[in-house]
Amino acid sequence: MQKNMSRPAKRMSWLSMALSFVMMFSLLVSVAAETAEAKSSRLAVITDVGGDATVQAAGASQAYDAYTNMGLNQGDLIVTGANSYVVLKIKDTDDELTIGADSEVYISELAKKGSGKSSKLKMWAGSVWSSVKKLVSDDDELQVETPTAVMAVQGTNYLVTVNPKTKETSVIVASGVVRVDSSSVLADPESQQTMNTQENRYVLVYPAQQINLDKRDEVKDLRTKVEFIDMGSLVNQAPPKVLESIIKNKAEIDKENAEFLEKQKQQLEQNVHRPAGSTLLIKDQSDLDKIGKNLDNLVGNLAKAAIDEKKIQQKTIDEANKKIDDPLKKLDLSKVEQLDKTAGSDPELEKLKASQKAAADAEKLRQQAEEQRRLLDMQARLEAVLKQIENEKKALDEANKKAQEELQRQAEAAYLQSLTEAEKAKFEESKKNLGNQTANPAPVTQTPTGTSNETPSNSTTSVTWSSPVSATQGLPATVTARAVDADGVAQVQFFVSWNGSTTPISGSVSKSGDDYSIAWTPYQSGTATLIARVTDSAGQVYESTKQVSVSPQTGVQLQFTSPPASNTGTLSVSLQGYDYKAIQIHFLTAGQRIVTTTEPVSDVFDPTSNTASYVSGLNEYSDGNGNYEYVFAAMNTNGTANMSGAQVLRAVIQKQVSPFTITLAFIKIVKSDGTVVELTPTNLSAVVTGASS
């Protein structure tokens, strides 16, 4: 019996041991996991802070003021206000990040992964200057993500900015290499037949280069977005603290750029002319020397521009020089040389950029015309609705009038039925006398007839109009009226009314004796009502009106102004009389270029008579046989005001040869109603020969 009972007891003993082992193993696994997790965490520390800056810890509902030596972890959010900054350092790598004013930066990852270290930031607005040490392991990574791009680096000094409104991302590299992947890249099957897919979807940005990516732009080839560094834009946009950090890092920047140049020299000796994944083209040692000269003067140009714009002080340059051992590398603003934008440029890539820009400009013009047509259609429909409402109101007023007359007739008939014959006779006599008084009213003072009408709210004021007698659409005219008041004239204002819609005439009113004048350019034809509003010294207001007939202007006047006898000159094209939204002016040169990479062109569109916003540009096209065509293009960017009246499209050009001849090919005008007018040399032509330089 005892023998039989011992077997269950033995089974219970084994079960207890198994349960104990499972519990101990779970505990060991939990401890090991906690230990592994502790090893994977990394830390960043704030080394400097200024202004209004806050940190919201991961999982926290409240943000706290940032302070020096404050620790930061994965999941923390840093926000800086105006004129504020935060400088932080990642402890185990010594990577330093300067977060500029008005920035929002989220530490999305700060951890160890296997044998590597991963640092990732997400950035929604502002600017971050990164000074990254060389990554030790292939598994190491430092990545910055914005709404339009992802930047990955390997030992780099670079700046990332994000426009808080448009979310446009700019990446500017001072040293090292930044790989940029864009969310706005489009797959293009045709281009991928001749281009590696990876080249199409990402690009490597090298020292003295930058890339701007806008979420609103669809990009087929990221290489076309890489440009030479725009120093003026960098200085204007970057906060002072960021500029200080860049300049103070000159020693590290120079060191990394020297390594880059040495590597490119070795590749050149191996007949490799383009760095991997780069837009740079280094044909020979001369090209490499130009790039090296640019890199030597890169920080110097930045410091000089920042000093000129009063963004930094001399002490920043002094502090940077303390870190530089080589006297020849120290910053001396008196010896800074200008950067050569042609260094390392690829002619084929520049041609591709020009082609895509021309296509983009044409597409913008098309969209502008389409938008204008849509607006005009909406306007026509609105006018039709308003006309219908007006007609319905007139019909309703007429119906109400007839109903009122009928009620009055019925009331009068009922009243007459209650009268005696004598009372009826007396009523009819009174009615007849009242009708005579209405038909022959007492004499009153009449306003003189003609084109001028006066509202005598102040009988001591008189206005006499002298101009204009008439006007022409799109051409400036002068409005002049003489105002006299016994109490003295305090102010004269001018207004214009078209079909009952009254607006003030913009501009300053000039005074000569009792005459008051203002410049006025009518942008439509028809009958305009000019209004002079006079306020006297007693505060009383008097108005006088004058109707002016505005005739349409359909002719075009074109004028080329030839450049003077110098290396630069102005080519002006003046168009008058067209109410237009966009223009293209095509002209040819007799086998001569007026645009080269070393001879830049600046262009501007001058609206002389209105306040709308415009963009303009000058594009060059070649047939490959030495013949060149140039296209000026300008368009209205806000979609509301027209380019009307006398407008001037001007370009400042440098001549490559002298003399040079420009021949007009044709002009295309997109009018306000969306129609396109093309003027050819059959009805309009001009030839200009520049003077010898």
Image: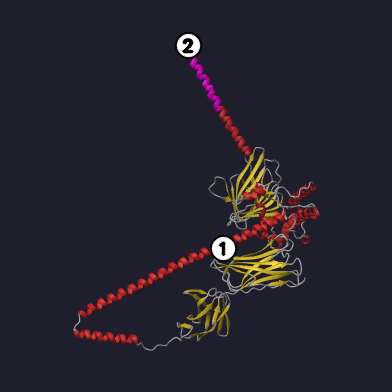
- Label whose residue precedes the other's in the sequence (1 or 2): 2
Q: Is residue 138 visible?
A: yes
**How many labels were placed on the picture?**
2
- Residue at the image position 34 percent from the left and 74 percent from the top: 398
> What's the amino acid at mark 1?
Gln
Disc 1: which residue = 368
Task: Report crowding for label 1: few under 14, some 14 to 19, many 20 or more residues within 10 A (C-alpha).
Answer: many
Q: Does the magenta stretch include residue 458?
A: no
Q: In which quarter of the image is residue 365?
A: bottom right
Q: The magenta stretch spans which residues?
A: 1-23
Q: Where is residue 291 in the image (x, y as percent from the top left)?
A: 76, 54
> What's the amino acid at mark 2?
Gln
* Residue 570 higher or lower than 626, as above or below: below
Q: Position of residue 617 (x, y in %)?
A: 65, 64
Q: Does the magenta stretch include residue 7?
A: yes
* Residue 223 higher or lower than 420, as above or below: above
Secondary structure under badge 2? helix
Q: Is the magenta stretch mostly helix, strand or loop?
A: helix
